[in-house]
Image: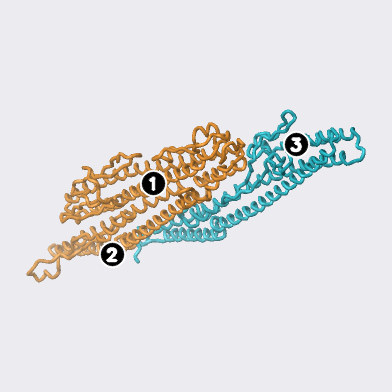
Amino acid sequence: MALSTLQIAKTAILARQAEIDLISNNVANVNTVGYAKRRAVLSTIAGAQNSTYSAIGQGVSLSAIQRLGDKLLDAQIDVETGQLGQELTFARSLAEIETIVGTSSGTGFTNALNKLFDSFSDLAADPSADTPRHAVIAAGEALCDEVRQVREQLLSALSQNDAQLTQLVADVNSLAEQVAALNRSVGAGGGPERAPDLAEQRANAVTELARLAGAVSSTRPDGTVDVYIGGHLLVQGDLALGLTTLPDGGSPPMMTVQFKGNTPPEALGGELQGTLDARDRAIKPALGALNGFVSDVADAINGLHSTGYALDGTTTGLNLFTYTPGDEAGTFALSAPIVADPSLIAAADAAGQPGNGGIALALEALRTEPAPGHTYSLMTEHSDYVATLGVQVASAEARADARQTVVDTLENRRQQLSGVSLDEEAVYLTEAQTAYNAASRIVQIAIEMMDTILALGR
Amino acid sequence: MRIGTNAFFRHITQTVNQSETDLGRLTVKLSSGKRIQYASEDPLGSQIISRAKTTAASAQARVRTLQQGVRLCLQTDVALASIAGWLQEATELASSATQSIGATEAVRQTAAASIRSARDAMLQAANSMSGDRYLLSGYQDRTEPFQEVAGVVVYNGDSGQLTAPLGSGRTVPIAIAGDRVFNFDGGVPGIGNAFQVLDDLATAIETGDIPTARNLTDNVSALFSHVTTLRGSIGTYQVRLEANISVLEEIQLRCNEVLADEESLDLAGAITEYTAKETAYTALLSVFSRVMSMANLFDLTR
């Protein structure tokens, strides 16, 4: 009898020891990202059948380790994290474009254009003098410099975008390899129930893939997971298919993302898609708008300037600005002969009248009046563009904020369900410790009982 | 709602980050004094600011141009006043020489010489400059308008009318071309140019041709009236310029009011908001500190 008591107490000690180990593991992972607390599921060991003593039972055993998580919630978080990655990346890039293209402080492009119009006004007041002509050259060069600077910043953003794309693809491939390797390990470990830590690492990698590329996963009956991006398999069991970047052959060259084997994904997500969106919906349109605005400014000014007359009273038909169609911002410059000889600036609207500032006056009027073929003035069109960009930035940031709130809410819900609380673990630890102590006491009592029995024989 | 240990730290981290972002944003606003740094903070407001700045810049540039026009008008008026003065003096000298009974030849010779001096002084006034611009050259403002060639004054300028912009294609003259001032354009019919008239007058007095001299004296009087009328025109131009400057300055003022409303930071509001955020941030840190200093069950487990 005492021996069976010892046996029962032993099962209790072993079970509680396992429970304390589990609590210890929970406490150790209190701040581990993606960790879901675990609880020991203990069950009684049934006694031998057909025996009066079978109702007593044979002790307790650790029948399972329960992971307190919600797979549906985890999947939802993956999807929302992918959306958040996409929207956040796009919003940040758009905000960067806004910083490059226009601020409300009056610096930069708007300021340079205003200075050019100021110089036309000064030229109109004294068209035959040298100083205002040099001022027009200086203001024109400042505008060209500003345009080139904005263009260079946009091209730099484009290049950084490509570098980011390449890095993201490398990260995605690395994570895909991790998931495939973990699939192998989880399978070798006897499935996710037997290898919960590996399964958790794999779940974290899948969440990261969702954030980076909008990946979704499905679990097979054998416990391995397949990962998809845009309907294509990225990870199939222990096989990782990767993404790759290829130059698109355009000018400037940009990267395209494909599956290895040249299959273009039908739809990406996450930061990868956000990065592509930033390029296609923010940086490229900004470059296009800059080129368009440069040609508008140059055409409007040249249209008037070419009808005017230089200081010599005879030279006419000269453009003030030059550019090459297709790369307007990159080639935007003052006409070289005019830079070399500012007297060639055509301020007069009639031949042989050096003191006539009719064209200079008309050029200055472009600041507030529409150029031919335009509904609004150049300045208004630019401020409209900056404001429209501002609306897009505000809208993208609002969408990203809203998505962040959704992700935070879901994450909070997950934390409520599966997050480790030290106080809660202390309660469970005390409970397990008490049970452990009690079982130890029973061992002591059983030993005393055996000593009593053995003493009868002496 | 159950808050786990990790969730607690996560909340604290998120709130600290948010508070720091808010405080940073307010610090940028307070240090710049501007309500809007980027269009995305208030797209409509940024558009209003941009337009107000463009309008103000345009008005400022026009004010500068018009003020230069006013200066030209004033200098032209001074030149015309001088010209009128010499014409008046010539008239008085001629009248004195042709109307006094028994004017001797010596008196006539002296009067003729004085009239020629007046004509030379008038030539000097006719070539008056503002900086390096000739006032009475029309559009040829870098060319000396009047030169004496073989005793005859010729006009090298043109009939161009220097103007200043008033906006919307409207302009106001700011000078008068010399051919009009000295009647090279025949604006006062039947009379030659002022220099020729004075030359002829001096010759007539010199030679004792009193009827011709009297006739020419009347012509000089007519030229004096003509120049006086032109002075009136210049005065009118100046008044128009000054009126437009006032309007443009008013526009600038309005634009500045718009900028003050839309762009300038409400300092009192921003400081209040900053203080509130700072208090909340301090409270957050205090709560975090207190919660962290509280014993948990592990501390109490023996």
Question: Does A423 sit left or right of A149 as displayed?
Answer: left
Is residue A422 visible to us here? no
Mark 2 belongs to chain? A
The amino acid type, in three-letter code, at marker 2 is Glu
Q: What is the x, y in percent for residue A127?
A: 60, 39
Question: Does A457 sit left or right of A248 as displayed?
Answer: left
Badge nearest the viewer, 3 or 1: 3
Q: Which residue is mark 1?
A: A283
Residue shown at the point (21%, 46%) measured from the top left: A240
- Rendered orange, the chain in question is A
Q: Which residue is mark 3?
A: B195
Q: What is the x, y in percent for residue A115?
A: 55, 44
Q: CA distance from mark 3 to mark 1?
A: 70 Å
Q: Quarter holding the N terminus of chain A?
A: bottom left
Q: CA distance from mark 2 to mark 1?
A: 60 Å
Badge nearest the viewer, 2 or 1: 1
Label 1 residue SS: helix
Question: Does B17 sit left or right of B77 as displayed?
Answer: left
Instruction: Pick whichever, A4 or A116, lies toward us.
Output: A116
Label 2 residue SS: helix
Q: Which residue is mark 2?
A: A431
Label 3 residue SS: helix
- Rendered cyan, the chain in question is B
